[in-house]
Image (cartoon, rainbow, N blue to C red):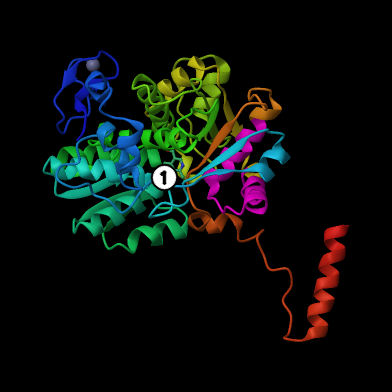
Amino acid sequence: MSFAIGLKCRECGDTYPAEARFVCEQCFGPLEVDYDLVAAKGEVTRESIAAGPASIWRYAALLPDPGTTPVDLGAGWTPLRRADRLGALLGLKELYLKDDTRNPTGSFKDRVVSVALSSARRLGFTTAACASTGNLATSVAAHAAAIGWPSVTVIPSDLESSKVAMTAIFGGTVLAVNGSYDDVNRLCAELVSEHPDWAFANVNLRAYYAEGSKTLAFEIAEQLGWRTPDQVVVPVASGSQLTKIAKGFREFEELGLTDGPTPRLFGAQAAGCAPIATALREGANVVRPVRPNTIARSLAIGNPADGPYVLDEVRRGGGDIGSVSDDEVLECISLLARTEGIFAETAGGVTIASLRQLIARGSIDVNRPVVAIISGHGLKTLDAVVDTARVTATISPSLAEAEAALTAHHSEVLS
Ligand SMILES: *Cc1c(COP(=O)(O)O)cnc(C)c1O
Ligand SMILES: [Zn+2]
């Protein structure tokens, strides 16, 4: 049973029933799902949660009502791994990686899509849709296929080939737009008015969609033994994930489910698209849109919808936001793979490179626990690494050639 009671404006606090609405009638501010945490207190317990399924739906009480059954491919309950080898290299005493590469379609977007499409089905929509930088489209197309819904996903035309294939394979309509993600997003806002029965996960269903990200905070706290971490590093595109991770930790604290500090949140952006990091550095309250130019395509949103809220959350805890070059992103994809055996997409490289930068800048307390969120699988952005991740040598099936290649490689490694 869900303790959601409706929607609430994030600006003026006006309230609405839990229906298909995404902007406030009073002030045009964005809406979010509101819960009766007073009623939930004592009802939602560590035991009741632990008795639930090994997916985001163990937290159903603190998610929007999914109707009779959730739209569920098994998103969430991904491993939280202690990362001592990478931690030691970075100078951290206690580093954990939240390995969200291990979701049904290989990214954290399965969390938000499972929640959005469950609400969409409950509200009577009949088609799944989204504006996407790639991973969202894949997840929407997969979840729609699994419930027999048509899907319409809209992406920039120059996305990574693996992301395009991973979306198209599910059989929905994929519209590739000659333009940036911000152009895609504008087009989808127009499509929403033309097709009122289409559920755009991150447009007209955005209030519901966003709630899925809270499960990252819930899982991290539960997996640490119902203890909050001191510091969490989060990749930032629209900023929805970061703001809802903050909301998730607050809800658990209000319910008395966790011990530990209020986590300080840190953002991670690519320098080629770092509008929120720039605003933070300049002390600005508004986020000036940029034209993205980075290999971290999943984070390439130049005009982030949740930008000001990210600034609030990061400032509130005395956090910071990293901004890293594409070379650092590639270097850190490989660093993560070589030290921890996790192959992340470019967004994961942004997170690890930002973590390293924030440590160097003194923003992160190296003696206190840190959790870094690895939000997408490396197979999604193979294009980014094919030039650097190569075979050691190509040889004939001959022992002599094998030994010669091994010797040559050995001396190369030692030199
Ligand atoms: C979408 C996405 C994010 C962050 O998204 P927000 O829009 O900030 O919620 C992070 N990592 C990956 C891999 C993504 O696809
Ligand atoms: Zn309002």
Is residue 100 located in the magenta-colored stretch of the structure? no
Q: Which type of secondary structure does the marked residue at label 1 adopt?
A: loop
Q: Determine whether 408 is above or below 262 in the image.
A: below
The residue shown at (63%, 50%) is 340
Give x and y (percent) for residue 38.
25, 18
Q: Which residue is mark 1?
A: 108
Q: Which residue sits at x=22%, y=35%?
A: 204
Identity of the residue drawn at 68% across and 33% down: 92
What span is in magenta? 329-357
Q: Position of residue 272 (x, y in %)?
A: 56, 37
What amino acid does circle 1 point to?
A: Phe
SS majority, magenta? helix
Q: Is residue 177 visible?
A: no
Left/right of residue 390 with respect to residue 59 in the rendered view: right
Q: Residues within 10 Å of mark 1 (few under 14, many from 20)?
A: many
Q: Is residue 114 left or right of residue 367?
A: left
Split into quadrants, the picture shows ligand 1 in the one at top left
The picture quadrant where one finds residue 186 is top left
Quadrant showing the N terminus: top left
267 lies above or below 110: above
Could you say which quadrant of the image residue 270 lies in? top right
